[in-house]
């Protein structure tokens, strides 16, 4: 697949670059960053113009991200409404969706920014999720454009500076990105497990306190009054 994309770049130039980057940003499982690095290498060799590559790549990436956002906004909401009608998805309620939307709005900015250039594999999913959760479009566009500017500069710059070995450099950057993704997943799973353990511990403590209260309520009245009763308050026989 990569060889096919690079061959298309050699034959069709900027048009091929725009189409591939657009489709990759929209969520297709192809590497737009790799093709940008190749384009930077071709620019260093004089086959392409670096100052034309930048706006072409940036416009394609931003429009692809916007396509994913608006798909989530239009299709995702209807899809969740359909799921909410199914018995097996009764946990999808307006209250749970509102909590998810509130949480996403607090965390989405940096997530959108980072997935433009570092954890690129999650970019398409984050775009769709941002639309699904109705993340404000102006804020989405700000973080998206900011991240994509950095992404295009990094990919084109690596290809241009390391033209002779751009494939090796792009591979190293991809491996680093995969490592960051693995660390993020491990952190999320660890946080989830720790939260579950704390919830179970609190549930056991609450259950223990409930059992003690229940046992105390079942004790005979005389036994309940004896521990706190003074000696001079004991009944005197006739």
Image: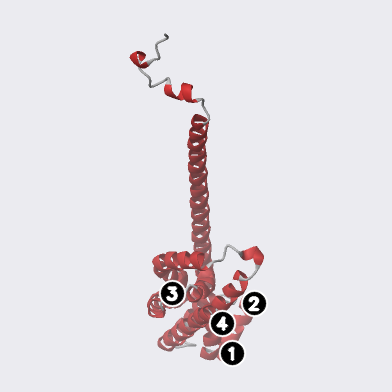
Q: Which residue bears the numbered disc 3? A: 135
Q: Nearer the viewer, mark 4 or mark 2?
A: 4
Q: Which residue bears the numbered disc 1? A: 11
103 up-or-down from 130: above or below: above
Q: In which quarter of the image is residue 5?
A: bottom right
Q: Answer with mark 1 or mark 2, whichever residue precedes in sequence.
A: 2
Query: Can I make out residue 107 in this image?
Result: yes
The CA distance from mark 3 to mark 1 is 39 Å
72 up-or-down from 180: above or below: below
Q: Answer with mark 3 or mark 1, whichever residue precedes in sequence.
A: 1
Tell me if mark 4 has few (under 14), some (14-19) or many (20+) residues whose alpha carbon lies within 10 angstroms of its own: many
Q: In which quarter of the image is residue 140?
A: bottom left
Q: Which of marks 3 and 2 is in front?
A: 3
> Residue 204's spot in the image, x, y percent?
52, 39
Q: Which residue bears the numbered disc 4? A: 23
Q: Which of 115 and 193 is in front in this view?
A: 193
Q: Give me the residue at 48% from left, 25% from top.
A: 221
Q: Answer with mark 3 or mark 2, whichever residue precedes in sequence.
A: 2
Q: Nearer the viewer, mark 1 or mark 2?
A: 2
Q: Answer with mark 4 or mark 1, whichever residue precedes in sequence.
A: 1
Tell me if mark 2 has few (under 14), some (14-19) or many (20+) residues whose alpha carbon lies within 10 angstroms of its own: few
The CA distance from mark 3 to mark 2 is 34 Å
Count of marks placed on residues: 4
Instruction: Specify whether 89 is left or right of 182.
Output: right
């Amino acid at each position: 697949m990569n060889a096919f994309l690079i061959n298309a770049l050699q034959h069709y130039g900027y048009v091929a670059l725009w189409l591939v980057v657009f489709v990759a940003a929209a969520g297709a499982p192809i590497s737009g960053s790799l093709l940008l690095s190749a384009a930077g290498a071709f620019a260093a060799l004089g086959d392409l113009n670096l100052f034309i590559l930048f706006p072409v790549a940036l416009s394609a990436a931003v429009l692809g991200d916007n396509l994913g956002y608006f798909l989530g906004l239009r299709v995702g909401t209807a899809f969740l409404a359909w799921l909410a009608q199914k018995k097996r998805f009764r946990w999808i309620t307006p209250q749970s969706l509102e909590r998810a939307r509130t949480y996403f709005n607090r965390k989405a900015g940096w997530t959108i920014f980072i997935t433009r250039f570092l954890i690129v594999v999650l970019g398409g999913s984050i775009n769709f999720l941002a639309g699904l959760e109705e993340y404000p479009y102006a804020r989405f566009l700000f973080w998206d454009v900011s991240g994509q500017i950095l992404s295009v500069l990094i990919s084109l710059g690596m290809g241009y500076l390391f033209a002779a070995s751009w494939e090796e450099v792009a591979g190293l950057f991809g491996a680093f990105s995969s490592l960051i993704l693995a660390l993020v997943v491990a952190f999320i799973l660890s946080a989830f497990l720790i939260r579950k353990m704390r919830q179970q511990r609190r549930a056991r403590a609450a259950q223990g306190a409930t059992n003690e209260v229940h046992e105390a309520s079942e004790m005979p009245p005389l036994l309940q009054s004896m521990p706190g009763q003074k000696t001079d308050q004991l009944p005197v026989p006739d």
